């Protein structure tokens, strides 16, 4: 997995990866694997509470434990605005939070976004931006 991450990021001509840090084991494992593959300075954690985040302190501890740079961005207002705008244009009521936020980040970040999701087993989704 470590070699695959390194090869993928290298082939994408990216300087590093951005990982949404939730404070859970999924983001911890993926951040650790990326740090092993690329070095701590090439892994950037983003903590994105949508208003309040119960496990925000766990996300901070994880970033500090792994010695990766991180920032916290409260996405509540941006998320609400994006959802309203997309619902209006698509005339739909249900949208995935992750899909919506990743779409918004696409216009802001150059590189590779690493996403995690736990569904029976850890699945790592890597999207080239």
Image (cartoon, helix red, strand yellow):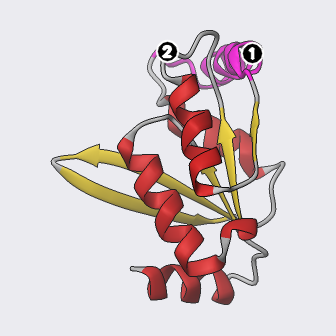
Q: Which comes sooner in the sequence, label 1 or label 2?
A: 2
What residue is shown at x 62% (from left), y 35% (from top)?
A: 60
Place of residue 102 in the rendered image (x, y in percent of width and height, measured from the top left): 63, 44
Residue 87 colored in magenta in the image: yes
Circle 2 is placed at which residue position? Answer: 54
Residue visible at 72% across and 39% down in the picture: 104
Q: How many marks?
A: 2
Looking at the rendering, the stretch of residues picked out in magenta corresponds to: 74-93
Q: Position of residue 29 (x, y in %)?
A: 41, 57
What residue is shown at x 56% (from left), y 18% (from top)? 91
In the depicted structure, whether residue 52 falls above or below residue 35 = above
Where residue 36 appears, as percent x and y from the top left, is 54, 76
Q: Circle 2: is it few (<14), some (14-19), or many (20+) Cα within 10 Å? A: few
Q: Classify residue 60 as left or right of residue 44.
A: left
Question: Which residue is found at the position 57% from the left and 84% from the top?
Answer: 6
Q: Nearer the viewer, residue 79 or 60?
A: 60
- Secondary structure of the residue carrying tag 1 is helix
Q: Which mark is residue 9?
A: none
* Quarter where residue 8 is shown: bottom right
Q: Which residue is more in the foreground, 117 or 21?
A: 21
Which residue carries the number 1 mark? 81
């Amino acid at each position: 997995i470590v070699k695959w991450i390194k090869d993928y990021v290298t082939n994408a001509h990216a300087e590093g990866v951005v990982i949404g840090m939730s404070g859970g084991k999924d983001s911890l494992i993926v951040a650790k694997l990326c740090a092993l593959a690329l070095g701590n300075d090439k892994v950037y954690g983003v903590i994105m509470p949508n208003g309040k985040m119960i496990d925000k302190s766990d996300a901070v501890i994880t970033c500090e434990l792994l010695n990766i740079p991180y920032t916290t961005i409260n996405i509540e207002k941006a998320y609400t605005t994006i959802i309203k705008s997309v619902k209006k244009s698509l005339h739909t009521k249900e949208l995935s939070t992750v899909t919506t936020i990743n779409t918004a980040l696409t216009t802001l970040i150059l590189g590779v976004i690493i996403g995690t999701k736990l569904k029976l087993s850890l699945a790592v989704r890597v999207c080239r931006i």
